Amino acid sequence: MQLDGKLIKENGHDYLMEALNFPDYYGKNLDALYDCLCEIECEIILVNSDDVDDDILETFKDAADENDSLEFSIQ
């Protein structure tokens, strides 16, 4: 799956929730993002990463370190 950093910047957690098919109870914050990323099985490629806040990038990286079924890379 490819995520666009420009859309993350514009629509934040709403974009992530829809793109990654997170549940309706997704809390739309970094803790909730980490929790949901730790539960999915997916390969995520991020484009336009310069548009994404460092805290979101770190959350993706931390979740990928924790979840063996999640691959995260920046293109």
Image (spheres, rainbow, N blue to C red):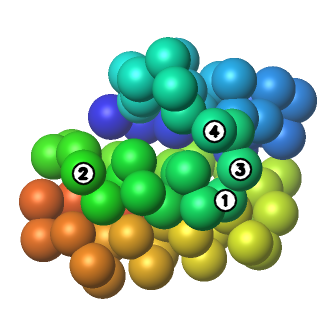
- Whether tag 4 and tag 2 are in contact, CB under 8 A, the answer is no
Q: Residues within 10 Å of mark 1 (few under 14, many from 20)?
A: some
- Kindly identify which residue carries mark 3: 29
Name the residue beneath numbered marker 1.
30
Q: Is residue 30 above or below residue 68?
A: above
**Measuring 32% from the left and 34% from the top, which residue is drawn there?**
1
- Mark yes or no: residue 55 visible: yes
Mark 3 to mark 1: distance in Å? 4 Å
Q: Are marks 3 and 1 in contact (CB under 8 Å)?
A: yes
User: In this view of the protein, which residue sits in the foreground, 70 or 39?
Assistant: 39
Determine crowd level at label 4: few under 14, some 14-19, many 20+ residues with C-alpha closer than 10 A: some
- Mark 2 belongs to which amino acid? Glu
Characterize the local packing of mark 3: few (<14), some (14-19) or many (20 or more) Cα atoms within 10 angstroms.
few
Q: Farthest right residue?
A: 10
Q: Give the Cα separation between the discs numbered 2 and 1.
A: 14 Å
Element marked by disc 4: loop
Question: Residue 27 bears which disc, if any?
Answer: 4
Q: Which residue is mark 2?
A: 39
- What amino acid type is highlighted by mark number 1? Leu
Q: Amino acid at mark 3?
A: Asn
Residue 19 placed where, x, y %? Answer: 48, 23
Q: Hey, what amino acid is under mark 4?
A: Gly
| Mark pair 4, 1: CA separation | 9 Å
Q: Is 26 above or below relative to 61? A: above
Q: Give the foreground label among 4 and 1.
A: 4
Point out the tag, 2 or 1, that comes first from the N-terminus: 1
Q: Residue at x 12, y 71 (%)?
A: 68
Asked where in the image residue 42 lies, by quadrant, the reply is top left
The kind of secondary structure element at disc 2 is: loop
Q: Marks 4 and 3, Cα distance to the nearest angstrom?
A: 6 Å
